[in-house]
Image (cartoon, grey):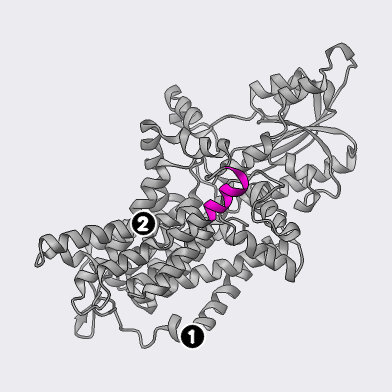
Amino acid sequence: MLRAFGSDRSSPAQWSGAYPALVFAVLFVFIFLLHLPLLQLPYFWDEAGYYVPAARDILLSGSLIPHSTVSNAHPPLVMAWLALWWKVVGYAPLVTRTAMLVLAAFSLLGVFRLAERVANTKVAVASALCTALYPVFFAQSSLAHVDLAAAGLTFWALSAYVEGQVVATVLWFALAALAKETAILAPLALAGWEIIGLLAGLLARKSVLRKLWLNGSDPKSNIGPVQRIAALLIPVLPLGLWYAYHYAYTGYVLGNPEFFRYNVAATLSPVRFLLALALRLWQVVGYLHLWVLTLAMLLAMCLLPPQRDAASERSRISFPVQMVFYVVVLTYVVAMALIGGAVLARYMLPAVPLVIILSVSTLWRRLSYWRAAVACVALAFVAGWFWNPHYGFSPEDNLAYRDYVVLHQDGERFLEARYPMARVLTAWPATDELTRPWLGYITRPMRVVRIENFTLDEMLSAADFRANYEVALIFSTKYEPGPAPWDHWRTWTEMKTRFFGFHRDLPPAAAAKILGGRAVFSEQRQGQWIAVIELEHIEEASRSPSGSQLLARFPQPTSRWRSTLRR
């Protein structure tokens, strides 16, 4: 069947099929050594806010519905995987990150297998290398999130799909959807593509368009379009059963109402959709040095003829397989622009490696020195681990997340050592870091007063209640490299604020002045910062609000809601 799809079989062996354990071991050792300095870091942002607490609930109570944080209806497969590791090995960040690296290596094996099936072993090796080194994939490899695992299972499903393996296609797509619900997008999109191909075949049996579909390109195939469509739709059933179970226990299908509002209801705006669509397109073709690879591919495709080996030219990835890749990539770009309150790059992990495979295959086909080109791309990706771009991005997309964790370790250890009994004014996720010692930042819980962020409005509001806390822990909640030329355009700033939660945190000196205190600790790392502010209290009992007034001003559920808003 691979020959029918136009795959190159110049390699003497299909390594992922003949030696899968060996390939997996090589991939795991490679990424484990790369992540070795990161394996004992405490939990970061959404890890601490949702995924680790949800997995811990499974470990301690066996409940698939989290109760130590507000449920957002994510399927429990990855959290159960972590709970299993903790049960067998022990609860520690090292265990958590090693368990996630196992999933990352399995995902890379899926990339390798898919690229080998649709191209050849040389392309597979280069594609797996580039994927492993791509900053977003690298950073996510050891973080306790669900997106990379769902992407990896999707690659295994796509490999089975292009090979015509019906049962394996159902299995891998079902597992991908149980890792994260948005993974169901790929089989649904391909089912729609198959239906279009079926109709095209009925309307024009000899049409050249039929060769755009896998089944139409192989007249000897014994896998019919109806079987393919069924294999792509069956994975909806286990996901539907999970949602039925979640509804029976919580009364909600797609998470709590605030989660649904943030990720779906509040995103259905034409203007926001167009802005998010542009961001999603950038994330699959140019984000964090990905443009180095895609630009090289475009130049090679436009300027250079195919290279020749022996008597024939190097073959491309067949058009039916390319169409499968394009359908999946386009579906994720459009769907993730339509839903999802935070436009995070990790949501595009099922799409980006497909772009990498297509690009590497083009370089192999058209460049005589394609290995040198791939090496340059790999170096650019590694540079992206350390170099923060000149535009706003999420720290979880490269090693900026390590800077965040180290800053919070230092600040919160100082806070615990100097003010162990103090009431601390701060925002999520530090509220969780200070109240849950098992997240790895402190040794015992501290009392906190919660605010939303450290903007001017929040600081002025907090100043009215300064009798209710003794110190404040403030930090950068967003990475901003400084105002770009377009940031001076007021309309652009307003749109970012309205649609993407943009805000500017006050620097420590300004915050200290508003709160009536002084900064006793501060630290910075590549655009991120943290500070501890000690208040100079003046006892004014008449200005101290009652307990109910304090709760009204600083609602306690805020941190849990914030931690479950991002998908």
Mark sitting earlier along the chain (1/2): 1
Q: Which numbered disc covers residue 83?
A: none
Q: Which residue is at a point 78% across and 42% down the rendered structure image?
A: 434
Q: Which residue is mark 1?
A: 19
Q: Which numbered disc covers residue 188?
A: 2
For the residue marked with disc 2, what is the amino acid? Leu
| For discs 1 and 2, the disc positioned in front in the rendered view | 2
Residue 326 seen in this snapshot: no
Q: Is residue 68 left or right of residue 231?
A: right
Q: Is residue 148 magenta?
A: no
Q: Which residue is at a point 36% across and 56% down the rendered structure image?
A: 188
Of 179 and 41, nearer the camera is 179
Q: Which residue is at a point 47% across and 27% down the rendered structure image?
A: 493
Residue 321 seen in this snapshot: yes
Count neighbours of disc 1 (C-alpha within 10 A) and say few if under 14, some if 14 to 19, many if 20 or more. Answer: few
Instruction: Locate residue 245, reporting x and y percent.
Output: 57, 53
Q: Residue furthest top?
A: 542
For the residue marked with disc 1, what is the amino acid? Tyr
Total marks shown come to 2
Please name the predominant secondary structure of the magenta segment in the image.
helix
| Quadrant in the picture for residue 482 | top right
Q: Which residues are magenta?
A: 242-251
Q: Is residue 420 above or below residue 292?
A: above
Q: Is residue 298 left or right of residue 29?
A: left
Count neighbours of disc 2 (C-alpha within 10 A) and say few if under 14, some if 14 to 19, many if 20 or more. Answer: some
Q: Is residue 551 above or below residue 222?
A: above
Instruction: Locate residue 135, reporting x and y percent.
Output: 52, 57
| Quadrant in the picture for residue 521 | top right
Q: Is residue 511 left or right of residue 504?
A: right
Quadrant location of the N terminus?
Answer: bottom left
Q: Which residue is at a point 25% across and 62% down the rendered structure image?
A: 301
